[in-house]
Image: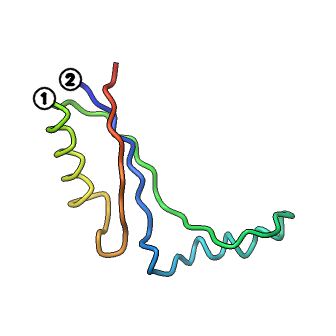
């Protein structure tokens, strides 16, 4: 069966996000007042085959832990849906 994983990877809340801070500080330059915080991360869509939903979750966990996310500095969450 084919699955789609939608994965969001974000810097941990405890860590500084310099890119997000720069964006937040510049919101006033485009007339967006009141923006207090911006965090910038990654969104990944992965299409793949797996025997079951449990196997699909296992594959996504492996991809996140070993390649997609630096778990020392980032957290991740995902949803999995059947493709088709």
> In the image, residue 23 lies at what x, y percent?
67, 69
Q: Is residue 37 left or right of residue 16?
A: right
| In-front residue for pair 54/72 | 54
In contact (CB < 8 Å): disc 2 and disc 1? yes
Q: For the C terminus, which image quadrant?
A: top left
In percent of the image, x 72 and y 76: which residue is there? 25
Residue 6 lies in what quarter of the image? top left
> In the image, residue 27 lies at what x, y percent?
76, 68
Determine which residue is flagged by label 1.
51
Question: Looking at this rendering, what residue extends furthest in the top direction?
Answer: 84
Q: For the N terminus, which image quadrant?
A: top left
Q: Check the image and report above or below for 58 versus 65.
A: above
Q: Badge 2: how crowded within 10 Å, few (<14), some, or many (20+)?
A: few
Judging from the image, what secondary structure is the residue with disc 1 in?
loop
Q: Check the image and report above or below for 20 versus 57.
A: below
In percent of the image, x 62 and y 76: which residue is there? 21
Determine which residue is flagged by label 2.
1
In percent of the image, x 78 and y 70: which residue is there? 34
Tell me, for residue 67, which label it has, or none.
none
Q: Label 2 vs label 1: CA separation?
A: 6 Å
């Amino acid at each position: 069966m084919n699955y789609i994983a939608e994965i969001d990877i974000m810097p941990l809340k405890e860590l500084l996000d310099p890119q997000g801070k720069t964006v937040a500080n510049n919101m006033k330059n485009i007339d967006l007042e009141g923006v207090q915080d911006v965090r910038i991360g990654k969104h990944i869509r992965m299409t793949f085959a797996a025997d079951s939903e449990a196997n699909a979750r296992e594959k996504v966990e492996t991809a996140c832990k070993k390649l997609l996310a630096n778990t020392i500095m980032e957290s991740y969450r995902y949803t999995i849906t059947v493709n088709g």
